[in-house]
Amino acid sequence: MKLIIAIIQPHMLESVKAALSEVEVFRLTIMDCQGFGRQHGKTELYNADEFLANLRRKVQLQIAVNDEFVELTIAAIKKGGRSGDEGEIGDGKIFVLPLEDCIRIRTGERGPEAI
């Protein structure tokens, strides 16, 4: 089992969800977050004053999958989250972490069956 954490552009969320549905990955948690990387933020105006808004809005997806779905999930996130054919700086990141256990609260099932 793995926990896949993906940080994507907010406007790409619907296309990522559609790509995940195509590979039959339907369970995910979505959180709004902020951060920056190579984009380094941008200069904005507020009441005619310039200031550096160095945190950009992003969306974080958390998806627990069984091992046979790891590569399918990664490919779907890349397909739905990439800007154009080549992608652009700021498209996001995907992290894959080992998932030691999963427990379904309702039934008490554990492990791969609980996902």
Image (tube, grey):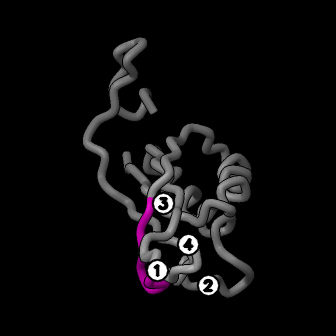
Q: Which residue of the protein is positioned furthest toward the front in this rendering?
A: 47
> Neighbour class for label 3 at 10 Å: few (<14), some, many (≥20)?
many
**CB under 8 Å between discs 4 and 1:** yes
Residue 78 left/right relative to 35: right
Q: Which residues are magenta?
A: 34-40
Residue 25 vs 9, above or below: the answer is above
Density class for disc 2 (Cα within 10 Å; few <14, some 14-19, many ≥20) is few
- Looking at the image, the residue that sits furthest to the left is 100
Q: Is residue 21 magenta?
A: no
Amino acid under disc 3: Ala
Residue in view at x 58 percent, y 79 percent:
48
- The residue that disc 1 covers is 51
Q: Residue 37: within the magenta? A: yes
Q: Residues within 10 Å of mark 4 (few under 14, many from 20)?
A: few
Three-letter code, disc 4: Tyr
Q: Is 19 on the left or on the right of 73, as rendered?
A: right
N-term-proximal mark, 4 vs 1 = 4
User: Which residue is label 3 attached to?
Assistant: 6
Q: Nearer the viewer, mark 4 or mark 3?
A: 4
**Count of picture labels:** 4
Crowding at mark 1 (Cα within 10 Å: few <14, some 14-19, many 20+): few
Q: Which residue is mark 2?
A: 88
Q: Residue at coordinates 44% horizontally, 84% vertically from top-left?
A: 40
| CA gap, disc 3 and disc 2 | 16 Å
- Find residue 46 and name its label: 4
Secondary structure that dominates the magenta span: loop
Q: Secondary structure at mark 2?
A: loop
Q: Measure the alpha-carbon separation of dots 1 and 2.
A: 25 Å
* Quadrant of the drawing holding the N terminus: top left
The CA span between labels 1 and 3 is 29 Å
Between residue 72 and residue 5, name the one nearer to us: 5
